[in-house]
Image (cartoon, helix red, strand yellow):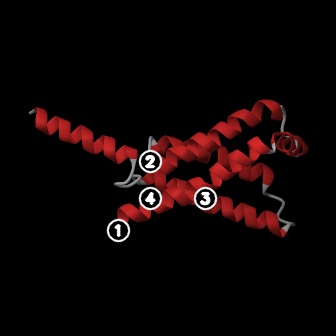
Amino acid sequence: MQKWILLIARICLSAIFFKSGFDKIVGYEGTLQFMASAGLPFPGLLLPPTILIELLGGLSVLLGYKTEWGAIALLVFLIPTTLIFHTNFAERMQQIQFLKNLAIIGGLLMLIGTEPGALSVDARKKWNGRSRSTTEM
C-alpha cells in the first residue's frame, strides 16, 4: 500500500511543476512581462532555467529518478519564487498562493527526508544493484 501512496504523492507534487513549466513555454512573452513587472532583473536570462527546473525537477520527482536532487532543485526554485511573488498579504489570493507553496515545500522536504518508494527508478536501481552484488559472490 505504501508504494502506491508514495507514487501518488510524487504524481501530485510533480503535476504543478509540469503545468507551470508548460504554461511558461506557451505564454513565454507574458511570463517575461510578468517577471519584469515584479522587478526581476534580466527576466530573459532567468526564464529558460526556470522552465528547465520546473520540467526536469518535476520529471525527476514523478519518475523517482535522482529524486532527492530533483526535489532540492525544486525547493531552491520555490523558496525565492514564493518570497518574490506571493508576499503581498493584503491580497487574499496571495495569502492562499503563499500557503499553497508552503505546503508544496513541505511535500518536497518530506521527499528529501525519505525515499521515493518502491515504484521509482531510484528503488529499481538500488534493487538491481543489490541483486547483482549478491549473485556475483
Which part of the image, by quadrant, shows the C terminus? top left
Q: Residue at x 82, y 69 (%)?
A: 92
Q: Are marks 4 and 2 in contact (CB under 8 Å)?
A: yes
Q: Secondary structure at mark 3?
A: helix
Residue under label 1, please give it.
1
Disc 4 residue type (three-letter): Leu
Looking at marks 2 and 1 on the same chain, the residue that comes earlier in the sequence is marked by: 1
| Rendering coords of residue 30 (x, y %) | 86, 44
Q: Separation of disc 4 and disc 2 at Cα?
A: 8 Å
- Residue at 64%, 50% in the rendered image: 17
Which numbered circle lies on residue 104? 3
Side of 76 where 120 appears, left or right: left
Pointer 4 or 2: first along the chain? 4
Give x and y (percent) for residue 96: 74, 67
Residue under pointer 2: 64
The CA distance from mark 3 to mark 2 is 17 Å
Which comes before the other along the chain, label 4 or label 1?
A: 1
* First of labels 3, 2 by sequence position: 2
Q: Is residue 123 visible?
A: yes
- Give the CA distance from mark 3 to mark 1: 23 Å
